[in-house]
Amino acid sequence: MMKLPSSRKLGLSLSRLLFTFAMVYSSCVVTVHAESRKELSGVKNEISRQQHSLNSQKKKFSTLQKSLKQQELQISKLEKEIRETKSSLAQSNAKIGQLENKIQQLESQKREQSEKLKELIQTYYITDRADAASSVFNNDAEADRMSQYFQFLAEQRAQTITDLENTKQDLETSQQQLKLEKDNTAQLLEKQTDKLAKLKSTQSKRQGTLKKIKKDISNDKVYLSELQRNETRLKAEIAKAERRATISMNGLASKKGRLPWPLKGRVLHRYGASQAGLSRWKGIVINAKYGEPVKAVSSGTIVFSDYLRGYGLVVLIDHGKGYMTLYGFNQTLLKKEGDKVTTGETIALAGDTGGQAQPSLYFEIRKNSKTQNPLAWLSK
């Protein structure tokens, strides 16, 4: 018969077992907690790393956008200077043409006056000899007539000499002016060549910047953040314009569906359409030719005319009663803040600023800061 352990021994054994179990359980809990803390710490570190990476990408993207702005403003400035130089060249060439015509006329006039003087001298000489040979037979009346004729010849000769001298002086002055204009044209051409080279270089740099930006916007979070910041900037500028506005015009309400297009072209992006799958267009994008005139859709006052990140060179027109129209992506701005404009007046030249891949126009209509569908306002 098996001998059972005493209750005291049984109690001690049970206590040891419970103690051992408690120690093992405690060790497991400590191990699990340590692993959890380690895993949590790893998650926090990964979140911190990704946040740091995102911030770094945003900073890099912002730096690229600043470079793009500087390059696009430089391109706009150079193109404006090139247009001005072309205009000066056209004026200078026109002056050269006028001077060359004048010189031809003066040279022809000089030849005629020289020929006339030659004839007068010959006539005077022949008449003088004939008068001397027949003076013994002439009476007083004939002598008086010849004297008057000689006086007339002398006056004609003197006048012709004076005219000839004036013509020579005028011709010399015109030739000097022609030389100055040709020198000026040569300098303008040199300046034009230099500006075109700078323009080409800057355009090349812009393309490089755009490639880097395109590579960076593959990160949706960075690009979405940029789109949101661009919209915030635009709203801030509109709010400032509204605070400054003192327009007493009638707005656009009566012109809905009858507004002229700012330029004619195919609509590339419609109002409300997805923008890179991240946001929605607040206006429309119209295909344009580089340098094509952009026109005001209605009379108003320019309340913003400057570069705005994401929208390039922008014109904002206040039409009164809370209505505003916005024209973006321009290459050149032709109006400044405070200018009054009329319907159909050219306010800018279309381009690709704001980092666009092709020339186009971004067009918005707002009523009390809220966007409207432009296609509902423009004439069909």
Image (tube, helix red, strand yellow):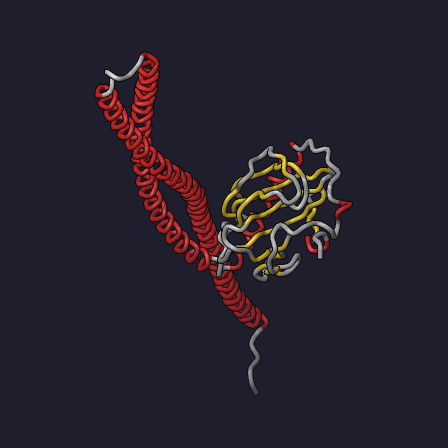
Query: Residue, x 65% and y 52% (percent of image)?
Result: 261
Q: Quadrant of the rendered structure where residue 138 is?
A: top left
Residue found 61% across the figure and 36% down from its top: 303
Residue 242: where, in percent of width, then height?
66, 36
Residue found at the very far front of the displayed protein = 137
271 shown above or below 11: above
Relative image position of residue 67 (x, y in whole percent):
42, 47
Residue 131 x %, y %? 25, 20
Task: Choose between 305 and 20: the one closer to the eye.
Answer: 305
362, 100: nearer the viewer = 100
Task: Please tell me whether residue 12 is drawn above or below residue 309 in the rendered image.
Answer: below
Where residue 18 appears, x then y in whole percent? 55, 68
Residue 326 image-quadrant placement: top right
Q: Would residue 189 appear left or right of 366 to someone viewing this image?
A: left
Of the 4 image quadrants, the one containing the C terminus is: bottom right
- The residue positioned 33% from the left and 48% from the top of the image is 197
Give the image quarter of residue 335.
top right
Asked whether residue 117 is in view, the answer is yes
Q: Is residue 37 visible?
A: no
